[in-house]
Image (spheres, rainbow, N blue to C red):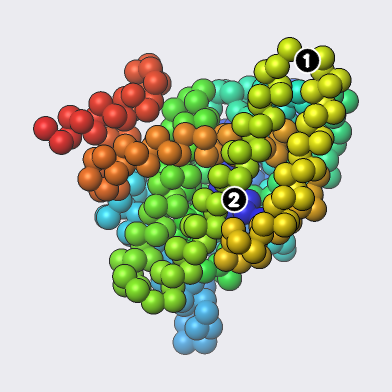
């Protein structure tokens, strides 16, 4: 299964813990920001320059290749795509697990009304992150008591929006070039373009640019043909097929949720619709997908919190792609136009369309 944020793929408000840790420590010793901030400070303190992995005559070849790949992706993101040049991903942290944090999301059971948390600087955020998965489970239990659907997912990266130098983590060393490019470009978009109180647009934009940027990177570095690009194209096709299936399920459920029938009947129909969709998914899998990466959908307990994540990350993707293609398919020009978007300017898609139109004049 793909974990959002390319796979992660996701902005994570724990940066506030770092910003306010010292100021809050005397009055808020048990609070969320203090606990998460302490862990983040620990990681930042452990970070070493990325180049140290490749230093010396005895450096392992895989370490050298990892450093070269990261530096090459960062240079491509800045020079070829126009993303902001920062010190992000110039440091490395050795961590004893295969993910960075556990993220909790929640939604109403009988609608796609997402639960949000309020943070300074970033505004309303539709997820909450924890470095300790047990803390995430406790948060999830609290939300379930409020009669909400809840989902916990692992993420492998997040952006501190340029406040700090976001490091790389040891579990990333085995990532393929396309996955690494997707993750780094996604997070660098957050560090370049961020609209407070509009996480929907922030995530849709980063998801679109991350995916498109990774494909362009692979094509530029490995050519227009070959196994590497073919793998990327198959992966993109599978992801698109999965999103289309999920969107169909969301639309089917949304029709029920917006109907006038009693809540109890809505919940009953919800379970029948999800069960039928999972059976249909399993039966049609071989005709829909190239790989086995999405088989788990038929086995997990799908709820609104899980589906709402796809509304958050992908519901506006078709509009962004349409604008991208209408503007000539230049991701550099697309990103340049996106940089002009402001919080006070209203609808960000409308602002993006206007900026692209001006750039063509």
Few, some or many residues within 10 Å of mark 2 (<14, 14–19, 20+): some
- Of label 1 and label 2, which has the lower sequence position? 2
Name the mark nearer the viewer: 1 or 2.
1
As drawn, 247 above or below 287 = above
Q: Is residue 251 shown to the viewer in this render?
A: yes
Q: Which mark is residue 261?
A: 1
Which quadrant: the N terminus? Answer: bottom right
Q: Is residue 30 shown to the viewer in this render?
A: no
| View extreme (top): residue | 260
Residue beneath disc 2: 242
As drawn, 117 above or below 359 = above
Residue 56, horizontal then vertical, whole percent: 47, 82
Q: Secondary structure at mark 2?
A: helix
Report, in whole angstroms, how far the alpha carbon at label 1 lies from the one at label 2. Answer: 30 Å
Q: Secondary structure at mark 1?
A: loop
The image quarter in which residue 96 lies: bottom right
Along the line of sight, the residue nearer the viewer: 237 or 260: 260
Residue 222, horizontal then vertical, whole percent: 35, 73
């Amino acid at each position: 299964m793909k974990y959002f944020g390319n796979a992660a793929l996701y902005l994570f408000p724990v940066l506030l813990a770092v910003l306010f840790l010292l100021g809050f420590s005397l009055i808020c010793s048990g609070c969320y920001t203090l606990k998460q901030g302490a862990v983040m400070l620990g990681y930042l303190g452990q970070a070493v320059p990325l180049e140290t992995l490749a230093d010396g005559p005895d450096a392992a070849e895989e370490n050298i290749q990892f450093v070269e790949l990261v530096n090459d992706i960062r240079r491509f993101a800045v020079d070829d795509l126009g993303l902001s040049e920062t010190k992000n991903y110039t440091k490395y942290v050795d961590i004893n697990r295969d993910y960075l944090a556990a993220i909790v999301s929640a939604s109403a059971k009988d609608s796609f009304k997402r639960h949000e948390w309020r943070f300074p600087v970033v505004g309303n955020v539709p997820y909450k992150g924890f470095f300790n998965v047990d803390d995430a489970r406790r948060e999830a239990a609290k939300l379930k008591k409020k009669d909400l659907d809840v989902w916990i997912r692992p993420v492998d990266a997040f952006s501190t929006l340029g406040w700090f130098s976001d490091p790389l983590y040891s579990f990333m060393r085995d990532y393929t070039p396309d996955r690494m490019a997707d993750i780094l470009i996604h997070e660098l978009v957050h560090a370049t373009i961020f609209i407070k109180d509009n996480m929907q647009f922030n995530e849709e934009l980063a998801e679109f640019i991350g995916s498109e940027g990774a494909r362009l990177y692979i094509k530029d570095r490995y050519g227009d043909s070959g196994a590497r690009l073919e793998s990327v194209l198959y992966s993109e096709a599978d992801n698109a097929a999965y999103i289309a299936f999920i969107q169909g399920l969301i639309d089917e459920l949304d029709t029920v949720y917006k109907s006038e029938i009693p809540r109890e009947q809505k919940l009953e129909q919800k379970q029948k619709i999800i069960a039928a969709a999972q059976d249909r998914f399993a039966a049609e899998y071989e005709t829909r997908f190239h790989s086995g990466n999405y088989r788990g959908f038929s086995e997990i307990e799908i709820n609104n919190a899980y589906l709402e994540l796809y509304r958050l990350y992908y519901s506006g993707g078709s509009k962004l792609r349409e604008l991208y293609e209408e503007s000539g398919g230049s991701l550099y020009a697309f990103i340049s136009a996106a940089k002009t978007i402001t919080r006070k300017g209203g609808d960000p898609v409308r602002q993006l369309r206007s900026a692209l139109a001006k750039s063509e004049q």
